[in-house]
Amino acid sequence: MTEVTYYTQDGLDKLKAEIHQMKTTGRQQISKAIAEARDKGDLSENAEYDAAKEAQGLHEAKIAKLGNTLSTARLIDESKLDLSKVLALSIVKIKNIKNGTTMSYQLVAESEADLKTGKISVKSPIAQGLLGKSVGDKTEIQVPAGKIEFEILEITR
């Protein structure tokens, strides 16, 4: 069974651009490296040629994986998000009940996750603990440092 992944328009555009780049300039660079290695002589003892062919295999495998991801990708219309509960693409403001620290996270697809910009994967422990909850709900989430209790302060898109 293939797993559906949900993307913002920006995330979907980046995925398509990455696949395009890999299929065009990425393949050209690898072909050039193989040709240069082939020109260096006997292929049976040419480590540079073997390395270039291995790189080509890895490159093609990544293209196939990204293509599969794209085929199961679904675009979420952010304007139609239900703001009464935490869903994929929600921006959630939460408060650590123990120390009073507040933070905001947007729950995004794994490939869009970037903690520096406040985007966490919907598969992360914090996101899993927040999904389906509403403003005012308190939830205890198991994180690597132990269990932390959070209160949901606000849900936006």
Image (spheres, rainbow, N blue to C red):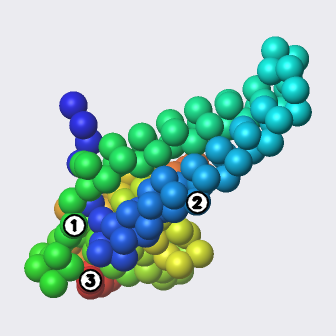
Residue 46, picture quadrant: top right
Residue 75, picture quadrant: bottom left
- The residue tagged 1 is 75
Q: Position of residue 101 (x, y in %)?
A: 53, 80
Nearest to the observer: residue 81 or residue 128:
81
Q: Which mark is residue 28?
A: none
Q: Residues within 10 Å of mark 3 (few under 14, many from 20)?
A: some
Pick the quarter of the image with the N terminus.
Answer: top left
Check disc 2 and give the amino acid type: Thr
Residue 85, picture quadrant: bottom left
Q: Residue at x 80, y 42 (%)?
A: 36
Q: Earlier in the sequence, mark 2 or mark 1?
A: 2
- The residue tagged 3 is 157
Q: Residue at x 11, y 79 (%)?
A: 80
Give the alpha-carbon distance from disc 2 to disc 3, as whole Å: 36 Å
Is 32 rendered above or below residue 115?
above
Q: Are marks 1 and 3 in contact (CB under 8 Å)?
A: no
Q: Are marks 2 and 3 in contact (CB under 8 Å)?
A: no
Q: Position of residue 83 (x, y in %)?
A: 17, 80
Q: Which mark is residue 25?
A: 2
Mark 2 or mark 1: which is in front?
2
Nearest to the observer: residue 42 or residue 117:
42
Q: Please indicate whether residue 146 sits to the left or right of residue 19 in the image.
A: right
Q: Please indicate whether residue 140 sits to the left or right of residue 34 in the image.
A: left
